[in-house]
């Protein structure tokens, strides 16, 4: 087994000033804002140069360089790139040479006033040298907001000075997107003319990904116009735009080279008023035209160039709010690296599985090194780090392991026999070893000694003897037992660096061992203690033992065997002293299912309803066996949804989870309870969705839901936009009389001082009920289809049967009479003969 770990790069020395990287950052961090310090750090593509943009108290640039041949540079004078001035620096960008054989890349320092300084690092000439200075903007009053490089274009968002007659709304659309062709060669840098690709647009951040440039709205501006809900993808080569949204839909595919922002989003005005996409908390280009996004919902997703949004990984709930706004994310081959605060997440992009979660001492900035683009690399205040694959620390078998294991066997046997003994005398290990009546622990101790001796000597001789067959049958149990004891020994001897990995492995082994058999009172108490003392390790162990996976649609899946689910979903244990008060457990022993629900609620609350659905599927429909209203429930037959509800606090701060759990149960009583909660909260759109979903499941449930909603219609006018949908939910057995009785019974009391005409009526009117009453009345007066064929008279009379001549009919009748008479006489004669 291998694990991903961070290793520090130790050969990055600052040979220009004799300072290390930590001292460099201490000096740089003292001059920049602590909230966005890492957002002002840039690295060269080859990882040899670190640039820190200083914004306070004066703008400037600090650089840290790595020399490939430092021993040749000790006797020379070094030229450092340190800039100070009054004009803020927007960004620094590396421009590759038009011809790769011309040498290293050129660094461009872009200032807010549009000035660009081009620098080149020459190791043979002792450092940085200024090549030339150019201006991007045509107007001296223009400001550069953001800048990026795409193919042979330099692209920037430019702020134009406001006009005298412009208002506050117009001032937010005084920006434009510009581009210039750029060519870098050995002789210098040449720029083309300014070309405005888009004007009258809001403030945008430009991000380059492959042949596309993404224009993201500035998160610092809360625009009330709604344009911050969308972002643009622009192809500089073809001058075509696409309008995207974080709601996983493309609002408009292309714009036929439209250069006016207002005309560009005209077709999206209707959608802007109804969509509510999550905020974009972080982003990173993939280099192939796609864009990696970190949304405020906690999802890390990738926006494909065709507009589709693919979910990759869901962060733990409240992770973004608890860690602040500092984050960084990159994709390295098939591994997604994400830093949130002081935690590094490593995710498999193919299946969304969390490969590793590493705690950091300080916040880090991820970057891609062109020399090694497959390995995640991170820069922090303490230095440079690279993620490597290391074998998991395997515990070494100590010399005293056999003695410890044998002693543990006898101690466990003492507990076992003492619980089942009728004698009051205390059993000891010495009595078990000396007495001849307890052969089981002595045999097991001998087997363990033989197994451990074979492990040490590595003798591979195999014979088809009874002893060999016994050892092969006990191989897996003995290996797990020895591994568990060795992990415990390693925890005691481990250093602080490896202690966390050992503890997590130990917790996982113990939880897996406890859940592999029937849980008694002592083992259940031990399991409760593990979850209480090591909540984070227990959470990770639970995911590993159950093989829990969350797909892009938020659904949970598990590959755990049915025997394990049977232990987890077993009824409430009588020995567990199961006493709850809606999430408040004091000195109580929780069953396994409640323990898992508590762990999910603590670390990933949004998984709780999905886990309940998964548990109900695994239970084989037992949780839905009582679909009636009047069935009594005991502590032994408590449904899973009620057991899951006990983990929620009493104050009702998680009513949205309570509603989801009630709806996931799909029981009539629970559904009506969830509906009443939604009605009390006034979430009418959600109320109608729930009603439309569950009215088709049962006629009795349909009638209760419709009656409850009809009561609300009688009392207020909040459901007016949904009346057409509600009338379609009217049950078949509802009559006009029953509808009017419900309405009249639930009408609110009329105020005494109200006049004959109210400006804003709050009561239901006959006009609102007219479509419903007409529909029900037509259904009552319409003849039943069951007897339609009887009630409807045929329009054409039936055909007359063919008539025969009267004489012929008489002859036929006489002939039939003779045949019947002769047959009767034959039967009579046979009876007499018998």
Image (cartoon, rainbow, N blue to C red):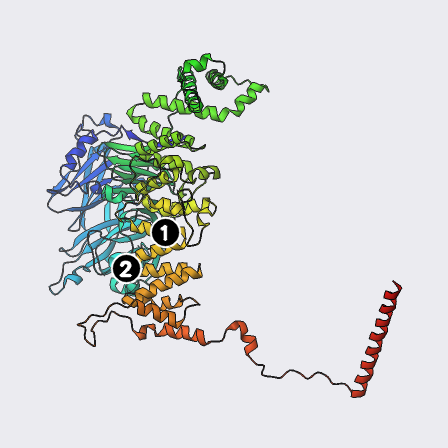
Q: As rendered, which of 362 and 283 lies closer to the eye?
A: 362
In the rendered view, tell whether residue 749 sits above or below residue 622.
below
**Residue 51, picture quadrant:** top left
Residue 49, how many percent across, how many down?
24, 36
Q: Judging from the image, what secondary structure is the residue with disc 2 in?
A: loop
Between marks 2 and 1, how big is the CA–CA gap? 18 Å
Q: Nearer the viewer, residue 547 or 651?
A: 651
Residue 119: x %, y % from top left: 20, 41
Closest to the observer: 379 or 12? 379
Q: Looking at the image, which residue sits at the far right?
A: 833
> What is the count of numbered marks?
2
Q: Give the structural element (helix, strand or loop) at label 1.
A: helix
- Residue 832 lies left or right of residue 645; in this view the side is right
User: Does 777 sit above or below residue 100?
Assistant: below
The image shows residue 765 at horizontal and vertical percentages of 29, 73
Q: Is disc 1 surrounded by few (<14), some (14 to 19) or many (20+) residues within 10 Å? A: many
**Which residue appears farthest toward the bottom when viewing the image?**
806
Q: Is residue 63 above or below residue 210?
A: above
- At horizontal 39% and vertical 72% (from top left) the residue drawn is 736
The residue tagged 1 is 662
Could you tell me which quadrant the C terminus lies in?
Answer: bottom right
Residue lying at the far top of the rendered structure: 434
- Left or right of 52, for residue 470: right
Q: Alpha-carbon neighbours of circle 2 within 10 Å: few (<14), some, or many (≥20)?
A: few
Label ID, residue 682: 2
Say whether marks 2 and 1 touch (CB < 8 Å). Answer: no
Residue 248 visible in the displayed image: no
2 or 1: tag closer to the N-terminus: 1
Residue 313 screen position, x and y as percent? 35, 44
């Amino acid at each position: 087994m291998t694990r991903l770990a961070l290793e520090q790069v130790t050969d990055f020395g600052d040979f220009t000033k004799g300072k290390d990287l930590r001292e460099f950052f201490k000096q740089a961090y003292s001059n920049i804002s602590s909230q966005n310090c890492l957002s002002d750090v840039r690295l060269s593509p080859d990882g040899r140069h670190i640039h820190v943009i200083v914004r306070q108290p004066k703008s400037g640039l600090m650089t840290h360089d790595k020399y490939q041949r430092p021993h040749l540079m000790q006797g020379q004078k070094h030229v450092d790139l340190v800039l100070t001035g009054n004009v803020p620096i927007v960004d620094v960008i590396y421009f590759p040479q038009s011809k790769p054989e011309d040498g290293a890349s050129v660094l461009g320092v872009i200032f807010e006033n549009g000035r660009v300084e081009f620098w080149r690092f020459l190791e043979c000439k002792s450092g940085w040298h200024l090549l030339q200075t150019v201006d991007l903007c045509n107007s001296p009053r223009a400001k550069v907001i953001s800048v990026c490089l795409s193919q042979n274009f330099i692209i920037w968002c430019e702020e134009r000075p406001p006009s005298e007659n412009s208002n506050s709304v117009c001032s937010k659309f005084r920006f434009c997107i510009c581009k210039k062709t750029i060519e870098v060669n050995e002789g210098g840098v040449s720029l083309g003319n300014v070309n405005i690709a888009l004007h009258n647009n809001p403030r945008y951040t430009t991000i380059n990904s492959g042949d596309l440039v993404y224009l993201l709205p500035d998160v610092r501006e809360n625009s009330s116009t709604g344009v911050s809900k969308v972002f643009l993808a622009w192809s500089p080569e073809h001058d075509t735009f696409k309008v995207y949204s974080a709601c996983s839909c493309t609002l408009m595919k292309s714009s036929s080279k439209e250069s006016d922002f207002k005309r560009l989003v005209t077709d999206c005005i209707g959608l802007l008023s109804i969509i509510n996409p999550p905020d974009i908390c972080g982003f990173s280009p993939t280099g192939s035209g796609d864009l990696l996004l970190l949304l405020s919902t906690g999802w890390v997703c990738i926006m494909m160039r065709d507009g589709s949004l693919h979910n990759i990984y869901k962060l733990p709930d409240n992770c973004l709010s608890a860690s602040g706004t500092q984050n960084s994310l990159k994709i390295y081959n098939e591994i997604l690296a994400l830093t949130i605060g002081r935690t590094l997440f490593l995710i498999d992009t193919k299946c969304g599985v969390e490969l590793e979660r590493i705690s950091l001492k300080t916040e880090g900035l991820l970057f891609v090194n062109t020399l090694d683009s497959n390995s995640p690399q991170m820069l922090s205040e303490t230095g440079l780090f690279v993620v490597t694959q290391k074998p998991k620390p395997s515990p070494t078998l100590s010399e005293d392991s056999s003695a410890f294991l044998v002693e543990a066997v006898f101690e466990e046997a003492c507990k076992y026999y003492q619980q089942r003994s009728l004698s009051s005398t205390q059993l000891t290990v010495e009595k078990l070893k000396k007495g001849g009546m307890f052969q089981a622990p002595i045999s097991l101790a001998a087997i363990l000694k033989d197994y451990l001796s074979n492990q040490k000597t590595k003798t591979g001789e195999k014979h088809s003897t009874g002893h060999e067959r016994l050892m092969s049958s006990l191989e897996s149990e003995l290996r797990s037992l020895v591994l568990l004891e060795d992990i415990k020994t390693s925890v005691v001897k481990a250093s602080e660096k490896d202690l966390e990995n050992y503890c997590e492995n130990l917790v996982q082994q113990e939880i897996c061992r406890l859940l592999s058999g029937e849980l008694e009172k002592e083992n259940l108490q031990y399991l409760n203690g593990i979850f209480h003392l090591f909540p984070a390790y227990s959470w990770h162990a639970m995911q590993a033992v159950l093989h829990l996976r969350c797909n892009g649609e938020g659904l949970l899946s598990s590959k755990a065997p049915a025997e394990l689910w049977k232990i987890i979903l077993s009824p409430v244990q009588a020995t567990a002293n199961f006493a709850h008060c809606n999430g408040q457990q004091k000195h109580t022993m929780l069953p396994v299912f409640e323990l898992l629900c508590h762990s999910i609620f603590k670390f990933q609350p949004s998984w709780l309803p999905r886990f309940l659905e998964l548990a109900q599927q695994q239970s084989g429909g037992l949780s839905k066996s009582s679909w009636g209203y009047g069935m009594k429930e005991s502590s032994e037959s408590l449904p899973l949804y009620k057991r899951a509800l006990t983990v929620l606090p009493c104050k009702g701060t998680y009513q949205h989870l309570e509603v989801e759990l009630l709806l996931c149960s799909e029981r009539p009583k629970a559904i009506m309870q969830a509906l009443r909660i939604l009605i009390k909260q006034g979430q009418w759109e959600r109320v109608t969705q729930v009603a439309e979903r569950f009215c088709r499941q049962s006629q009795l449930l349909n009638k209760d839901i419709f009656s409850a909603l009809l009561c609300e219609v009688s009392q207020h006018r909040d459901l007016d936009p949904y009346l057409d949908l509600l009338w379609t939910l009217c049950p078949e057995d509802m009559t006009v009389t029953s509808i009017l009785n419900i309405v009249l019974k639930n009408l609110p009391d009329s105020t005494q001082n109200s006049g004959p005409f109210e400006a804003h009526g709050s009561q239901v009117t006959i006009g609102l009920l007219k479509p419903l009453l007409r529909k029900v009345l037509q259904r009552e007066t319409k003849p039943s289809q069951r007897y339609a064929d009887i009630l409807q008279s045929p329009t054409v009379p039936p055909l007359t049967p063919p008539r025969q001549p009267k004489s012929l009919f008489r002859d036929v009748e006489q002939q039939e009479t003779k045949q019947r008479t002769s047959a009767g006489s034959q039967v009579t004669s046979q009876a007499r003969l018998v």
